[in-house]
Every structure is written in structure tokens, then in C-alpha cells.
Amino acid sequence: MAPRVTNPNFMNGVPELLVLTLLQQEEMYGYEIVQAIRSRTDAIIAVGEGVVYPVLHGLERDGALTARRKTVNGRSRIYYSVTPVGSYRLADLSRSWIHLATAIQRMLTGGQHGEAIP
């Protein structure tokens, strides 16, 4: 019997999706990304540097981001931007999340084979 294929722990991809989305729009540094996620989700999603920096380093290692040191107002920061590899990765992640969100919405609203949850 073949092993049963299930969905991976889908919450693991949320920080990567959010980081790539922000960086697709503009170059940012780590703490700025943390603040942008918090403010643009009305603090519903709040991730700290301990989540964001490993995601940034992993994406950079995979070639999805580039990093450059820049001095602004006397402070040296590392700014990240999306590469073409990162744009493709974002497109794939976005498609997956849209399909997932659609399926969850269908369950919550009683679409197809389910009843709406009161």
C-alpha cells in the first residue's frame, strides 16, 4: 500500500510568502519587514526577527533574494530584494495559498459538500 499523501504543515510557508510579497513591492531591511507584516495585517500576523531573519537567509541562499549593505542616516543595514528566482517562487506560493484559502472558505461557507459553520 502506498503511503498516504497529506498536506504539509501549511503554516510553515506563511512567513516566506509574506516576506517575498513585501520585497516584490520594494527593497527592505529585516526589522522593516517585521514592522510591515505587523502593520499591513493589522497585527493579526506578528512575526519577530527570530522568524524573519532565518527566512531571509534561506531565501538568499536559494537565490530568491539578493542582499546589499546600505547606510541610511548613519546606520548600516542589509537591504533585501527579490530576484527572478524569487518572483517565480512567489508566484508558485501565491497560487498554492489562493487554492488553500479558497478551499477553506468553501468549507466555512458550506460550499460544495459542506454545511456552513454557524
Image (cartoon, helix red, strand yellow):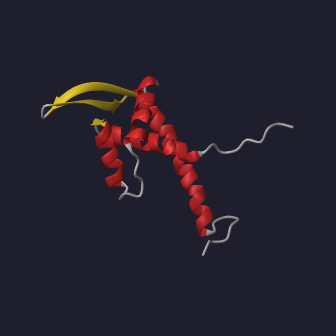
| Left or right for 96, reference 87 | right
Q: Residue 33 appears at what percent x and percent y?
A: 33, 42
Q: Quadrant of the C terminus?
A: bottom right
Q: Residue at x 37, y 57 (%)?
A: 43
Vertical order, 42 against 49 (above or below): below
Q: Residue 12 appears at what percent x and percent y?
A: 53, 43
Q: How many marks?
A: 0
Q: Residue 83 appears at what percent x and percent y?
A: 38, 28
| Left or right for 67, reference 7 | left
Q: Residue 79 appears at what percent x and percent y?
A: 28, 31
Q: Residue at x 60, y 56 (%)?
A: 103
Q: Quadrant of the N terminus?
A: top right
Q: Quadrant of residue 115?
A: bottom right
Looking at the image, the residue that sits furthest to the front is 50
Vertical order, 10 against 79 (above or below): below
Vertical order, 37 against 117 (above or below): above
Q: Residue at x 77, y 42 (%)?
A: 4
Q: Residue at x 28, y 38 (%)?
A: 26
| Left or right for 33, reference 94 | left
- Camera-side residue: 65 or 103? 65
